[in-house]
Image (cartoon, rainbow, N blue to C red):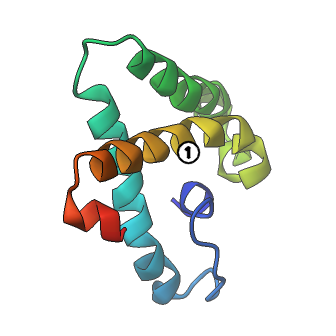
Amino acid sequence: MLSFTALFFDRDFGFDSIWNYRARLPFLLLIIAAIYKKCKPKTSSNWLFVLRAIFVPFVMLALPDLIIGGQGYAVSRSLISCFPGVQLAVAYLLANSVKNRQRFWQFT
């Protein structure tokens, strides 16, 4: 959560502080909504590109760590290859929502 939301909000309240997680929760929900919105219309093939850009590098890092043990996928610099996919999904969500004149997303 901390690595992916740091793309949009990176304020350090301390690792053990509950405010660190509360401040990042809206950005996590934004990322989840963007991925959901991108994958919902399966008419175009670019949704698969975005999913692959996010999840293939993450799984390649997380799977060996889960099997062998370790924390490699928890380090932000290891997840840099996932970040463009997240940014593409959020940009798609915001661009389509503003184009459709949805007031909430225009404010966001």
Mark 1 surroundings within 10 Å by alpha-carbon count, few (fewer than 14), some (14 through 19), many (20 or more): some
Could you say where residue 70 lies in the image, as x and y percent from the top left? 70, 44
Name the image quarter holding residue 39: top left
Judged left or right of residue 3, residue 50 is left
Given residues 57 and 100, the one toward you in this image is 100
Could you say where residue 29 lies in the image, as x and y percent from the top left? 34, 59
Judged left or right of residue 107, residue 7 is right
The residue depicted at 37 percent of the width and 69 percent of the height is 26
Element class at badge 1: helix
| Tag 1 residue | 87
The residue depicted at 40 percent of the width and 46 percent of the height is 95
Could you say where residue 83 lies in the image, as x and y percent from the top left? 63, 43
Name the image quarter holding residue 7: bottom right
Could you say where residue 40 lies in the image, as x and y percent from the top left? 22, 28
Judged left or right of residue 64, residue 30 is left
Name the image quarter holding residue 34: top left
Q: Amino acid at mark 1?
A: Gln
Check the image and report above or below for 43 versus 24. above
Check the image and report above or below for 84 versus 43. below
The residue depicted at 62 percent of the width and 64 percent of the height is 6
